[in-house]
Amino acid sequence: MNAQSERSLGIDCLRGVAILWVVSYHYLNVPAGTDGVLLFFAISGYCISFSADSSKTAWEFYAKRLGRLLPALAVAVLFITAAKHAFPDLIDASRIPSWFDALYTLVALPTLNVANLQYVRPDGAFWSLEVEFQFYALCAVLIAVGLRKHLLPAICIYCFVRFLLSNPANPYSNNFLSFFIAGLSVATYRKGGVTLAAIGILAACLLEISHVLLGYKEPSAPIGWSRFAVLLMSTTALFAASQYRAPALLKPVALVGLVSYPLYLLHQDLGAMLFAWWNVAPSDVPARGTGILLFIIAAYVVYACVERPWMKPVTDALSGRRRVFAAA
């Protein structure tokens, strides 16, 4: 195993920790599950830095994001919606999307809902995808205007300008960007930009502290000193995962991290429906542990059959490197 694969194993381990944290929050009542999502945002910032470096154009960068996310998302959206329509008694009626809602989700997320239509998310976990796509779109715009090599400082400046123009009474996605900045900073350090990385981490901390001190609101992941602690822990964990060899005994966690995206898409509402069908009490840890195992297996099937084989073809088709329909 070479050094690069060892570091990739470390990042997959961190993804595994993040998704197990989130799933355990929903299945086993482990506290602060949204902190696992914040860790995902930091990991995303780290990975996006390298994706931006390897993309020739802004559209190629965004096409890679779409190729990475859309195949598994499409399968999850269709399956979740079908399950909710087939078994409506197992889920609250307000969480059942129409088929228009389901299909529009696949358009609304990558376009940042440019049509400004109201729709029901097929799953409650999808709120974080809206944040992710906003970050990807911001990176794509900065790449388009020639700031690929200055992505970290450009995003820091953007965040502070938007912060100065914001209102603490109104939730806004900018208050998640400190975690993406932390991830970008760790990636910058890996590439040799020590001073710039330190400035980026300082900027992320100042942004998060400012949100805390001024009482900014965020219903999805409440802002407070505990969240600032999560920012520091996420940055430290990401630095360790990217710099040091991951021990072989963590390979099972890395495997969970490898399938973390489809697991995240599938676990929340379908898990609630499964436990309602089984009539499983919140205190029944063995049954809920079995549910976690079943969803990990389902996530691996989606990863192996959809996410991995379709990622490159969809990316190539969207970026223009391959025709969608070849001439006969």
Image (cartoon, grey):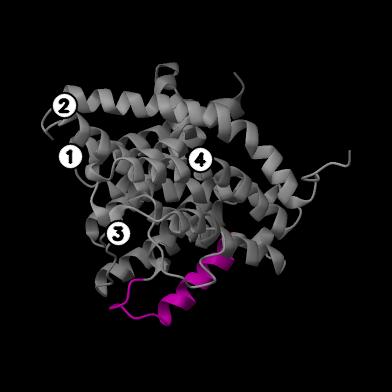
- The amino acid beneath tag 2 is Val
Q: Which numbered disc covers residue 29?
A: 1
Residue for point 46% across, 74% down: 160
Q: Is residue 288 left or right of residue 119?
A: left
Task: Relative to 271, say whether 166 is above or below.
Answer: below
User: Mark 1 or mark 4, which is nearer the start of the sequence?
Assistant: 1
Residue for point 68% across, 43% down: 314
SS assignment for the magenta stretch, majority? helix
Q: Are marks 3 and 2 in contact (CB under 8 Å)?
A: no
Quarter of the image with the C terminus is top right
User: Mark 4 or mark 2, which is nearer the start of the sequence?
Assistant: 4
User: Mark 2 or mark 3, which is nearer the start of the sequence?
Assistant: 3
Residue that mark 2 sits on = 285
Give residue 134's position: percent from left, percent from top.
51, 62
Q: Is residue 192 visible?
A: no
User: Mark 2 or mark 1, which is nearer the start of the sequence?
Assistant: 1
- The amino acid beneath tag 4 is Val
